[in-house]
């Protein structure tokens, strides 16, 4: 059977369009989507007529199987889309007001900021510079060493010592015990 011949293709279409539509409709339950599947199936056959091998089975079964596979793909996409929409609804419904909109959070953030600035002022200059460049400047220890003109080990030590002192200072100011450094 030469499916590349327009007359043969037209005859095959007329013979099998209902079966292909039925296979798709049983899965999707939607007439418009089932018609889209029919179009997809016959378009694939038209574009690649050699993909059907009559030795492997009957043409009608081949077309219905293609329709079933495409319909299942569409159904799965719809299911995944529905789940994503449901998750988004849950997230939106459970979303809290932004931090900037809650006065207690703003006050807490401001107090923490004051504590951090105060603790940073108490660090020796070279440690303060290293910590600021690493954590607020986003520089690596190597970049800090080059910028400060010191060996890499010295830059790393300054960062570590500065953080240790900050950790101790925060523990004292917040009235919390400071865990021992590892």
Image: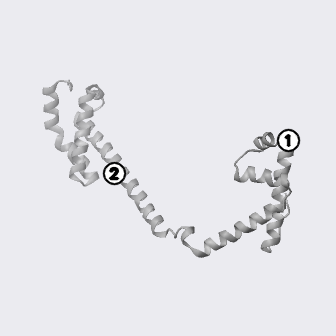
The residue nearer to you, when weighing 28 against 125, is 125
User: Percent x, y for residue 25?
Assistant: 24, 50
The residue nearer to you, when weighing 159 against 117, is 117
User: Percent x, y for residue 128?
Assistant: 80, 55
In the rendered image of this protein, does residue 47 appear above or below residue 136? above
Q: Is residue 124 left or right of residue 112?
A: right
User: Percent x, y for residue 68?
Assistant: 30, 44
In the rendered image of this protein, does residue 49 appear above or below residue 142? above
What colour scheme was applied to this rendering of the protein?
one colour
- The residue depicted at 75 percent of the width and 63 percent of the height is 117
- The residue depicted at 70 percent of the width and 50 percent of the height is 137
| Mark 1 or mark 2, earlier in chain | 2
Crowdedness near tag 2: few (<14), some (14–19) or many (≥20) residues, C-alpha within 10 Å: some
The residue where tag 1 is placed is: 150
The residue nearer to you, when weighing 129 against 155, is 129
Crowdedness near tag 1: few (<14), some (14–19) or many (≥20) residues, C-alpha within 10 Å: few
- Quarter of the image with the N terminus is top left
In the rendered image of this protein, does residue 26 appear above or below residue 50? below
- Quarter of the image with the C terminus is bottom right
Closer to viewer: mark 1 or mark 2: 1
User: Percent x, y for residue 144?
Assistant: 78, 44
Picture quadrant of residue 161: bottom right
The number of callouts visible is 2
- Residue at disc 2, secondary structure: helix
Mark 1 in CB contact with mark 2 (< 8 angstroms): no
- What separation in Å lies between label 1 and label 2 (alpha carbons)? 63 Å
- Residue at disc 1, secondary structure: loop
Residue 75 image label = 2
């Amino acid at each position: 059977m030469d499916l590349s011949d327009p007359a043969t293709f037209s005859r095959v279409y007329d013979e099998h369009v209902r079966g292909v539509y039925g296979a798709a409709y049983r899965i999707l339950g939607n007439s418009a989507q089932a018609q889209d599947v029919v179009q997809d199936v016959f378009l694939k056959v038209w574009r690649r007529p050699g993909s059907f091998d009559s030795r492997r089975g009957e043409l009608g079964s081949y077309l219905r199987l293609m329709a079933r596979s495409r319909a299942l793909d569409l159904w799965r996409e719809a299911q995944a889309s529905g789940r994503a929409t449901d998750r988004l609804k849950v997230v939106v419904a459970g979303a809290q007001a932004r931090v900037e909109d809650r006065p207690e959070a703003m006050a807490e953030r401001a107090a923490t900021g004051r504590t951090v600035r105060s603790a940073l002022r108490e660090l020796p200059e070279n440690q303060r510079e290293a910590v600021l460049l690493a954590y607020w400047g986003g520089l690596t220890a190597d970049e800090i060493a080059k910028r400060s003109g010191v060996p890499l080990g010295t830059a790393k030590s300054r960062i570590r010592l500065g953080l240790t002192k900050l950790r101790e200072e925060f523990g004292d100011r917040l009235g919390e015990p400071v865990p021992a450094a590892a």
